[in-house]
Amino acid sequence: MSYQALYRVWRPQRFSDVAGQEAVTRTLRNALSQGNTSHAYLFSGPRGTGKTSAAKIFAKAMNCPHAQDGEPCNACEICEGITMGRLNDVIEIDAASNNGVEEIRDIREKANYAPTQAEYKVYIIDEVHMLSMGAFNALLKTLEEPPLNVVFILATTEPHKIPLTIISRTQRFDFRRISAGDIVERMAYILKEKAVDYEEDALLAIAKAAEGGMRDALSILDQALSFSNGLITLEETLRITGSITQDLLGEYVSSALNSDTEKGLELLHHILQEGKDANRLVDDAILFCRDLLIFKKTGEETVLKMSKADDRFKKLAEAAKADKLYEIIRVMNQTQQEIRLSSHAEVYLEVATVRLTQPSAHSQDPVVHGAPADSQELSALKGKMQQMQKMIEQLQESGAKGPAPKPAAVQARKPRKQQAFKVNNVQVFKILDKATKDDLNKLKDVWPDLIDYLPAGQKAIMKTSNPVAASPTGLVVTFDYDILCERASTDTFLLESIGDYLEKVIGHRAELCTVPSEQWPTVRQAFIKQMNGNGSADDSSGDDGQQDRQEDTAPAEEDALVSEAIGLFGKDIVQIKE
């Protein structure tokens, strides 16, 4: 028999074998033992966390005639048939390759037939977010009125891509990333069964590299078994995973804390020359600094994610300043984003190393008589406030004697106006030229679902948005505040997310253009005026037109922005509000 990968051989066969998902497995076991099962479930979570395994165990437990406390016996004909994939009543479907309407219609037709061997017919649809919108609509009807003795289990790594109408008709279970401790415990059990020796630190390194996925951890362990000679060591594991030793990470962070640029670059080049992955270096540095920071504040070893609290680590945590650790995490996080968009990872890491090993800017703040310059400015402001308070008291005492003379030291200044968001009229007019009421109504129907689909940060930006015009290729959205217009128009991730959602829901992408709510009537009127002007170009060339142009000319002392607005739209349209 050919060799089978560890994650296949040691796939969980009982709920008790599923590592790190106690809340999910306990709920499912209780529902089975009490007979409170539903007709549809949604298992969501990161890859390799046990979603499909739990679905197959659930299918076995529902149909096993000898099940006890919600656990299958794994010895009867039905359990063995499901384990081997031979039972026709448990159908596992990959939605990535069967994502069309016809496939789902075929499922709907076959679901009406009674199960042949088992009590329940179970459909396990993996990566269900890959279904097309038509396929989701076809599946929706079945979920609304499910046939008797039919259960659907939907598994996905991206639940935000599933329509809310589907999610609302299922019981949702969120599988979380498996902790490093649970992964190490499972690997230790497997190695003990295989009679293989190992170093504890080696398993911990594998668990960190797996990033919460048991399947990834067992795949790495498989490689380590092939690479080793009967003993899995830390050195061999680090070579396989591309991770970096804690001592080397400690030296690299120390060079940043001590502002030793030469040492930092030397260590960086040494790490990269050993073939270590650039992204792995950034991840390890961020997590190592995180552990230093948390340990410095709490002193608890249990909160550490990837570090061992040895003497060297404790000394480094004690000596490190929290502000510098914050800076390292921030710079490394920024570098991680830059590396993903570039093929020159080494250059960005060199720049980050130089930045981190330079003296902090706050340590060079100008000092006046032993106090920072900010404190001196604060003292000066307090003095001015006291002077103004005295002036107010003098005015109150003078009463009817008339206004007090204006002191020369206090000069009234015209408040500085905040620059308003500048609307891209060319882009807006292009959309309005092709806009239709039908396109706008389609967008308004899906707009609430679109906002719910977005992550929390982008959802906060779009919460006050309102679509006001739409064409087949674009849409105009108003916001209550200028700052939200600015953020929405410059957030590339938000624009991509909106485009992806609209392409999936209405069949095409739409270019987003933002306009502040208070400016929208003005912009719309300007478009109408432009359209009328295109139809009768010489209508305003008479005396009245000349008079309007003279009145529209703003005086030199007016605000430049107001003058520009009056020049563009006319004085009758523009309203100036202080």
Image: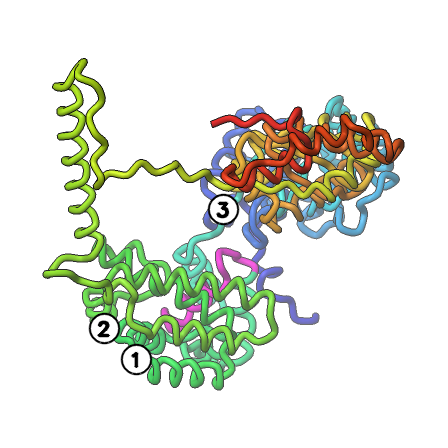
Residue position for label 3: 176
* Disc number for residue 260: 1
Direction from residue 43 to residue 317 in the image, left or right: left
Residue position for label 2: 312
Direction from residue 329 to residue 102 in the image, left or right: right
Segment colored magenta:
198-215
- Give the main secondary structure of the magenta stretch: helix
The figure's colour scheme reads rainbow
* Residue 343 falls in image quadrant: bottom right
For image coordinates 39% across by 36% down, the residue present is 415
**Structural crowding at the residue carrying mark 1, measured as other residues with C-alpha within 10 Å and reported as few (<14), some (14–19) or many (≥20):** some
Callout 3 amino acid: Arg
* Between 193 and 241, the one nearer to me in the picture: 241
**Structural crowding at the residue carrying mark 2, measured as other residues with C-alpha within 10 Å and reported as few (<14), some (14–19) or many (≥20):** few
The spot of residue 264 in percent (x, y) is 36, 80
The spot of residue 80 in percent (x, y) is 67, 48
